[in-house]
Amino acid sequence: MLLARCVEDCCRFIAGQTELSNSTVCLKEYRKIIEELEKLQPLIAPDLGRGGSYGWSGSPCPNDNQRKFIAETYYLYREIYHQVILNRSKNEDIGWNVYLGETLTCEDSGEPIKLEKVD
């Protein structure tokens, strides 16, 4: 889960959601840090205006490399969450969970990943 959260922060940052909330929440002054990081958003996604971000597939990002990075990292962290929740749901009733659904993919998502539990 640590890896998934770090990859999620990278994906969201490059998509314009610059707060790095998974990584900063453990810090004493995390609210102030988030406020400062959010000031970077216009540099990351200048065509979207303040507070805007690109979608899970990187659309409508005009930068091909940035769009591909968003799509690949979205798929990676989202599929890890999906597999963890699927595994957990075998042994307990977790009710409805967004990560029970299939991970969205697109042309830039990259090759499917396979997760294996290692004891």
Image (spheres, grey):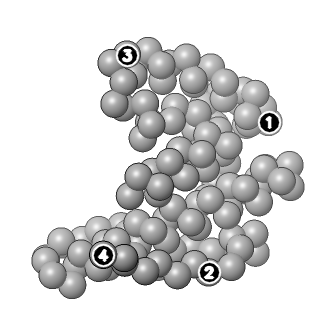
User: Residue flagged by tag 3: what amino acid is it?
Assistant: Glu
Mark 3 highlights which residue? 29
Mark 4 or mark 1: name the one nearer the start of the chain. 1
In this picture, residue 89 sits left or right of residue 101:
left
Q: Residue at x 18, y 72 (%)?
A: 95
Q: Please name the residue that numbered disc 4 is placed on.
A: 119
The residue type indicated by label 2 comes to Pro
- Cα gap from disc 3 to disc 1, whole angstroms: 30 Å
Cα distance between the residues tagged 4 and 1? 46 Å
In which quarter of the view is residue 43 placed?
A: top right
The answer to whether residue 17 of the structure is visible from this angle is yes
Q: Secondary structure at mark 1?
A: helix
**Disc 4 versus disc 2: distance between alpha carbons?**
23 Å
User: Which amino acid type is marked by label 1?
Assistant: Asp
Decide if residue 1 is on the left or right side of residue 11. Answer: left
> Which is more foreground, mark 4 or mark 2?
4
Quarter of the image that includes the N terminus: bottom left
> Is residue 53 shown to the viewer in this render?
no
